[in-house]
Image (spheres, rainbow, N blue to C red):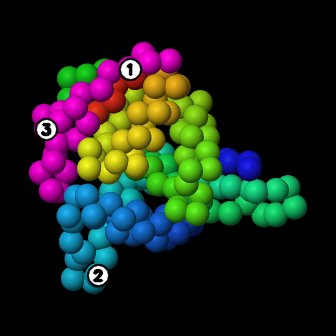
Amino acid sequence: MKVTLRQVTLQEKEILRNLLEKYDYEFSQYDRRDVNALGLYGYDYLDNYWTEENRWAYFILVQPNPQESPQLAGFVMVNNLPEVEGRETDFQMAEFFVLYKYRRAGVGRQAFLQTMALHKGQWQLKRHPKNLASVRFWDRVIAEYTHGNYELAAACPSTAYDDDTLGDVFFFRS
């Protein structure tokens, strides 16, 4: 299965907003976040990906075979804002989402590797420790990618999610 990243255009912002709602709905089981009065989670920083430098949003596209058109399989959002202040940071994985249909098929791994190829430097990546599938995924792909050359700060201070759980933060270089 061919996996590619394609930068999200301003004209495609609503598509990304729709996918973010699915992502936030799924993630609410961990961070216990509620919807707003319109029944939406909303993503406060979405517009910033087109109004500020150093923010990148990509669609993850999959093409099971060359005869088929690429299908939307998720998204990757990157910025240069550190999760943990005082640590060298060129990039931070703001959001990473693969639709259920494409999980456990190598799509997330390939999307991660392509993201690393596009953004070389010092990374921070925060994960919610209650999201066990995410914990297993990030443990595996980061250890593989870095050949074990990374730092993981468990329950890192000043990284609380909406449910007050402290995030685990990876520090590594791409």
What distance separates the C-alpha of mark 3 from that of mark 1?
Answer: 20 Å
The local crowd at label 3, few if under 14, some if 14 to 19, many if 20 or more residues have their Cα within 10 Å, is few
Q: Identify the residue position indicated by label 1 in the image.
A: 150
Q: Identify the residue position indicated by label 2 in the image.
A: 39
> Which three-letter amino acid code belongs to the residue tagged 3?
Ser
In the rendering, at what x and y percent does residue 114 appear?
Answer: 60, 37
Residue at (47, 66) in percent of width and height: 19
* Magenta highlight: main SS: loop
Q: In the picture, residue 73 is in which quadrant? A: bottom right
**Is 106 contained in the magenta span?**
no
Q: Magenta segment, which residues?
A: 147-168
> Which three-letter amino acid code belongs to the residue tagged 2?
Gly
Tags 3 and 1 touching, CB below 8 Å: no
Residue at (68, 48) in percent of width and height: 3
Q: Nearer the viewer, mark 3 or mark 1?
A: 1
The local crowd at label 2, few if under 14, some if 14 to 19, many if 20 or more residues have their Cα within 10 Å, is few
